[in-house]
Every structure is written in structure tokens, then in C-alpha cells.
Amino acid sequence: EAGVVQSPRYKIIEKKQPVAFWCNPISGHNTLYWYLQNLGQGPELLIRYENEEAVDDSQLPKDRFSAERLKGVDSTLKIQPAELGDSAVYLCASSLGGPYSGANVLTFGAGSRLTVL
Amino acid sequence: GQQLNQSPQSMFIQEGEDVSMNCTSSSIFNTWLWYKQEPGEGPVLLIALYKAGELTSNGRLTAQFGITRKDSFLNISASIPSDVGIYFCAGLNGSGNTGKLIFGQGTTLQVKP
């Protein structure tokens, strides 16, 4: 079974440029998460989707970040414009169900490492 | 906001030694998860704990869900070089659509052959 697939694995951009990350979750997983991981820190939730619906986006900086999950499968996370402080690893994860569904174990992708110069 | 405090922050041990790390919080959690992350990869689940007092093993790994529901620990017995990585605890709280998985800051483990 294929795991959570993310691309690109690495991205280097100049500040004020836009960037987008793509995630393909495990087949059949209804819940998809985007996490931000700064160097030396644990992952922090940006947004959680249940199928197509963003059910928790309270931590997403909406002035520059946006996400979508069309058709409830793949998802993209966009930053426009990028700032120096956005340099981090962006992790996508998926699970069969939501946090209290009993099928809540997250499987993570390898992440997309962003460097903003 | 809620925080999980992991300790120690890092460990450098000799191969064959046992390792113990823990995670504490001022808040109650309903589920505790332990993940391991290797360089350039995403975190991989090691052990999931769902009930206060629960003790669960996975090979050389043993984790416990604290009775107070505010802490958890992970033990690794007879460490080997491939145990190297960053170990994260994560706690799940809230209910329904407000449930959120919160991660600790990680314990970095290095094993000397």
C-alpha cells in the first residue's frame, strides 16, 4: 500500500514568491491534515479536512496561506507571498477517520522542506 | 495554548543501554501517541495508548498512559544504532470536530555503537 505522498520534497524560493505543496493521502483515508514543523520542534496543525470540508483551520494564517481539497482526495497548500519565517517542513498526514472516530491514527508523508531566501 | 513538555531534550547513550523518556502536560489527554522521526522523513507511529494506566509494548519499546492522563512515558530496552532519531509524544484532546493532536518538542536520541 502506498503511503502519503508529498511533492515537492524540497523547494527554495525568494521571499514574496508564491509556493504550493501537493499531498496525496492513503487511499480511503477521509481525514487529511497539514502540519508545519519548524527546526527542532514538533509538528503543529495548520488545517484538518474531513473529506472536502476544512473542519479545523484555526491555526492557518489566512492572510497568506490557503489550502484546498477538491473531491476529498488530494490536497494543496499554498503560500502567497512567502516570508523568510515560512522556512520549515510542511507535513501532510491522513487517517481513516477524525480524531474521535476510533480510526484516528495519523500516517505522515515525508514532508516538503521549504527554504525562503 | 496547551503544551506537552518532553524530557530529556536529547540523549546520547551507548548501544545496549536502556532509554527512558517522558511527556507531561498540565492538561488531560484522552489518547497518547508516540512517534519516531528520522532525518528527511515524516514521523512514524510507534505506539498508541487509549486508556489511563494502559501499558503497551511494541518489540523493545514500552509505553504507558499515565493514571492522571496528564503524562506518558516511553522506554526502549537494549538500544541499537537504528534507534537513532527524534521521538515525539502526541496527545489528543477535545471532542468531535474540536479534537486536536498536539505534539511535544521531541527527544533526540543518539546511540553510540
Image: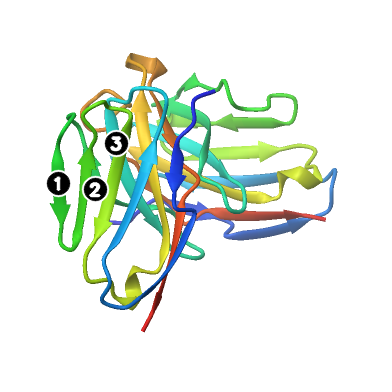
Residue B59 or residue A66, whichever sits in front? B59
Q: Amino acid at mark 3?
A: Trp
Image-quadrant location for residue A96: top left
Residue B27 or residue A63, whichever sits in front? B27
Query: Considering the numbered disc 3 on the image, is that residue within a helix, a strand or a loop?
Result: strand
> Mark 2 and 1 residues: CB-CB less than 8 Å, in contact?
yes
Which residue sits furthest bottom? B113
Q: Which residue is mark 2?
A: B47
Note whether B56 is above or below A113 in the view shown.
Answer: above
Image location of residue A64, percent across then percent down: 74, 31
Q: Which residue is mark 1?
A: B56
Query: Considering the numbered disc 1 on the image, is that residue within a helix, a strand or a loop?
Result: strand
Chain of the residue where label 2 is placed in the rendered structure? B
Residue A33 or residue B103, whichever sits in front? B103
First in sequence: mark 3 vs mark 1: 3
Residue A29 seen: no
Q: CA distance from mark 2 to mark 1?
A: 7 Å
First in sequence: mark 2 vs mark 3: 3
Mark number, residue B38 = none
Quarter of the image for the C terminus of chain B: give it: bottom left
